[in-house]
Image (cartoon, rainbow, N blue to C red):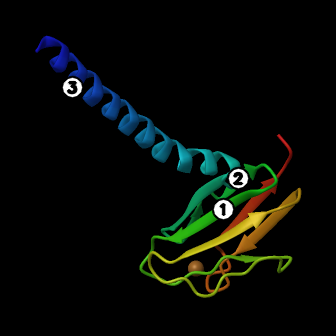
Amino acid sequence: MSYAFSRTTFRSFRSYAVLALVLCAAFAMPAIFAVAAAPVPTVDLNIAKFAFAPKEITIAPGTKIVWTNRDETPHTVTSNDKSFASKGLDTDDKFEHTFASEGDFSYICTVHPFMTGVVHVRKQ
Ligand SMILES: [Cu+2]
């Protein structure tokens, strides 16, 4: 009687152990792939109250900047050397650009040219 009980207990424990292993593998799998595909470092930048915030920023090469227009007015993100240029961004629209190489990139809003910003890309 007690023998049968312990066998059943053992069998159910074993099936839980197998289930736990399968679940661990299932959860670990996406994590392994996430590490393999190294995410691009991203910096969020706001366009608010007719200004780029922050107006000046220093990042490492390979960093992506995502600008979000928080104003009710359309703005653009347009580099002076034309290496990047957004369309007109409405409220909450985003524009992103990845800076591959070092340099100083000044940009303006073409609708409001008094709005200026600069991105310094430096190895850190
Ligand atoms: Cu503007």
Closest to the observer, 56 or 16: 16
Query: Where residue 31 appears, x then y in whole percent?
Result: 56, 45
Element on which disc 3 rests: helix
Q: Tell me the residue at 66%/75% (across/down).
A: 114
Closest to the observer, 122 or 62: 62
Element on which disc 2 rests: strand
User: Is disc 3 surrounded by few (<14), some (14 to 19) or many (20+) residues within 10 Å?
Assistant: few
Element on which disc 1 rests: strand
Query: Where residue 95 appears, x then y in whole percent?
Result: 61, 74
Q: Tell me the residue at 78%/56% (across/down).
A: 62
Please identify the quarter of the rendering in which residue 111 is found: bottom right
Report the residue marked by disc 2: 57
Q: Is residue 104 left or right of residue 89?
A: right
Which residue reaches farthest left? 1
Specify the quadrant that holds the C terminus. Answer: top right
In space, the residues marked 3 and 1 are separated at their CA atoms by 59 Å
Residue 65 — which label?
1
Specify the quadrant that holds the N terminus. Answer: top left
Question: Amino acid type of disc 3?
Answer: Thr
Report the residue marked by disc 3: 8
Q: Tell me the residue at 34%/28% (across/down).
A: 14
Question: Amino acid type of disc 2?
Answer: Ile
Marks 2 and 3, the one that precedes in the sequence: 3
Closest to the observer, 74 or 59: 59
